[in-house]
Amino acid sequence: MILIKNITVITQNKKREIIKNGALVIKDDIINAIGKSNEIERKYLKKAKKIIDGKGLVVMPGLINTHGHLAMSLLRGYADDMNLEEWWMKHVYPIESKFGRKEVYWGSLLAIIEMIKSGTTCFADFYYYEDEVAKAAQEIGMRGILGCAILDVPTFYYKTTDSAFKKTELLIKKFKNNSLVQIALAPHMFQTASIETYKKSKEMANENGLLLFTHTSETKQENDFSLKKYKQRPIEALAKNNILDEKTILAHCCWLNKKEIKTLAQTGASVAHCPVSNMKLASGIMPLQEMLESGVNISLGTDGVCSNNNLDMIEEMKITALLHKVSKLDPNIADAQTVLDMATINGAKALGLENEIGSLEKNKKADLVILNFEKSHLIPQHNLISHLVYSANGSDVDIVFINGKMIMENRKIKKIDEEKVFNKIKKII
Amino acid sequence: MILIKNITVITQNKKREIIKNGALVIKDDIINAIGKSNEIERKYLKKAKKIIDGKGLVVMPGLINTHGHLAMSLLRGYADDMNLEEWWMKHVYPIESKFGRKEVYWGSLLAIIEMIKSGTTCFADFYYYEDEVAKAAQEIGMRGILGCAILDVPTFYYKTTDSAFKKTELLIKKFKNNSLVQIALAPHMFQTASIETYKKSKEMANENGLLLFTHTSETKQENDFSLKKYKQRPIEALAKNNILDEKTILAHCCWLNKKEIKTLAQTGASVAHCPVSNMKLASGIMPLQEMLESGVNISLGTDGVCSNNNLDMIEEMKITALLHKVSKLDPNIADAQTVLDMATINGAKALGLENEIGSLEKNKKADLVILNFEKSHLIPQHNLISHLVYSANGSDVDIVFINGKMIMENRKIKKIDEEKVFNKIKKII
């Protein structure tokens, strides 16, 4: 039993309570108690095996990164300041096609280290060799939902669509009932996966009670492709083929019209908003406000390092707020609380884990992040939610718990020698 | 004599050279030598009183923040997610009007600590009680150009415009030939300062060889005000009255037309671009690309903490690049090198200090920042300029030199007890 006392608790519970002089008790993988420090201490001080004094610290739910490609961390800064097609075809794909198991493992390990160090405790990945991603996640103790990218074109991981499905089937068997790792279906995008591949993916997802990830309406080109091939916009084609429901997460969705937004809201599909990637690749601006008003569940994602170029969800929150305010010339929208919700409880909802993670509440999993707020850029403290979104950055995270285990303490990840990982990455490059 | 050896040097010199295994020698306030580490070591290793081993580190010119209001750090997170008018009239101004000497001193000290800790070595301030700002800057050893805000309405610092000019005159006398602090004229903005006040400010600036700071074309409302009052847009009115020249820095400039951009380029006036503030207050998007193409000198500024809500110029660089790419749907513009120039050498040029600071070159002032690049979010290192702009954040800064003096080492500011400052700020609040 671990007691965290004298700490400010940003609960993200239904009432969005902030508990000053709060405390939390972790038992096994669960938040066993939460409340005012004096009350919690009275009950648990003697029973606690470890006590963390939270003076000057703030605890919040671990951030949930709902869209990324972990191993692309190897390509950080490899190709910038060019459009998506050139970026992908001339730079990223040629080097990525030389990746194998080793590259995916070490690239994912690096990404997981980076995510934990900036406060992310759960990620959605969308790539190849997902058993290697799972290995990296389990070694560190990170929570992840992993989808093997399914394309109808040969990749460095498989030659045929059938083979991609077979690899996914094996992953599903291997990670059934795993406490940290779940598998998702991940048809890639309209230009690389046919609607038949989407349908087969959804069938396999339904049979196994799994999520489906995909990229949708990232660029105008993608919408044009869909209109030419299917005489329908992507969301219409997906809806017509029963791909959209509460177990579907669409990344990007920059190019939606009103009807598509309504369809998303009706089907209950979630959208993983990736503003930094969309801005850096100049893909477009997701119509956040219209989507929120229609009731679409919006979570946040960093996308891969290669189009970001980091995995800092705290930075992603700030840029989310800023982008939508200026794009509508309305400073009232995308307020700090709305954006924090996207990075926490909405992410949990998107992943079907809203009863497990995304807020600090009794009996939820102990996935939590402790930040040091005694820093020049976080003083004074008129409004903690504002500070988290607008003033903080990932380096303010000091301690991370995932599934009840302390994964990082004083910015040192416990199970991994970071320097060794860095040296290995440099050798691979 | 201080030797920094075995370090990667981002020079920002005319060729924009990056020296791997480089070295720098600091003598008094000056960069005495710069080049390959083996050559520099051969000459200076024995003479050096202090040697810094730069393994895994990167040294760059100190960042130059060309627009801000330091003491507003006291209002961090005090009012967010509302429009400029409500923000200013209902929230910021009522509390700000209670500020006095003490508040300006401590607020400025906090802001300077924050700036140094995120790699800024020179700032432009625009506020009240500038002698207190100067006091804070000199105590820490920070470089600053300070303008007393001149308004035609009473403020908490003076009652009349004349009094504002008198206070500025005293400042000019007090800080003549100061090595760290210079004074500028700072008429506030069109809604609060008449064109006569602008003219008188420029005269006083010219008489003393000083810069003139002002806010221009921040909002559409401001342009409308100018059109109504002067039958001219702000830039037209400023140009007609000879306010614009190479010693003028205009903050914001979101609402410019093509003719105004041409005027700016012709007069040689600089623009302090503040994208985060403009986005957060939803003021508008400065036409960066058109301005660069016309040859306008663009530097960067954070604006006050109250509309940012931090002073991290590294974050400001990333958001600059992202904003302009997405706003034009063109990922090629605002590339990493262009943005780094804005935060360094263009800032020096705006402040008339391009022969002193803004790049690491022999005989320039030793204003430099050393970052630790051995971190998970900065590995691997395909492109250092990309990493600085897109992957790093202010917390990666380890060591700061200003005017040849080591101001921060291992993230600890030498001359100030930060905790004491934080406690004082909390008391004031």
Image (tube, coloured by chain):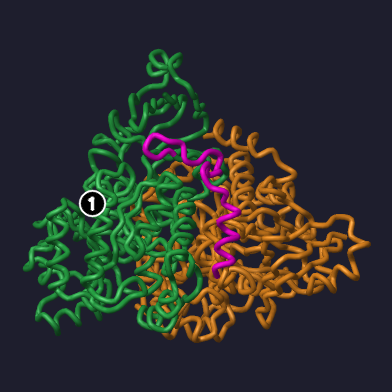
Chain colours: A orange, B green
Q: Picture quarter containing residue B159?
A: bottom left
Seen in the picture, residue B419 relative to B74 is either above or below; the reply is above
Q: Give the range drawn in magenta.
A: B401-429
Reply yes or no: does residue B428 show up in magenta.
Answer: yes
Residue under label 1 = B350
Residue A135 pos. (x, y %): 71, 47
Residue at 77% across, 66% down: A365
Residue A295 pos. (x, y %): 54, 85
Residue at 47% across, 62% down: B107
Q: Picture quarter containing residue B151?
A: bottom left
Query: How many neighbours does mark 1 have within 10 angstroms: few (below 14), some (14-19), or many (20 or more)?
Result: many
Seen in the picture, residue A328 relative to A402 is either above or below; the reply is below
Residue at 32% across, 62% down: B126
Residue B270 pos. (x, y %): 20, 56
Which of these two is toward me, A207 or A209? A209
Name the secondary structure under disc 1. helix
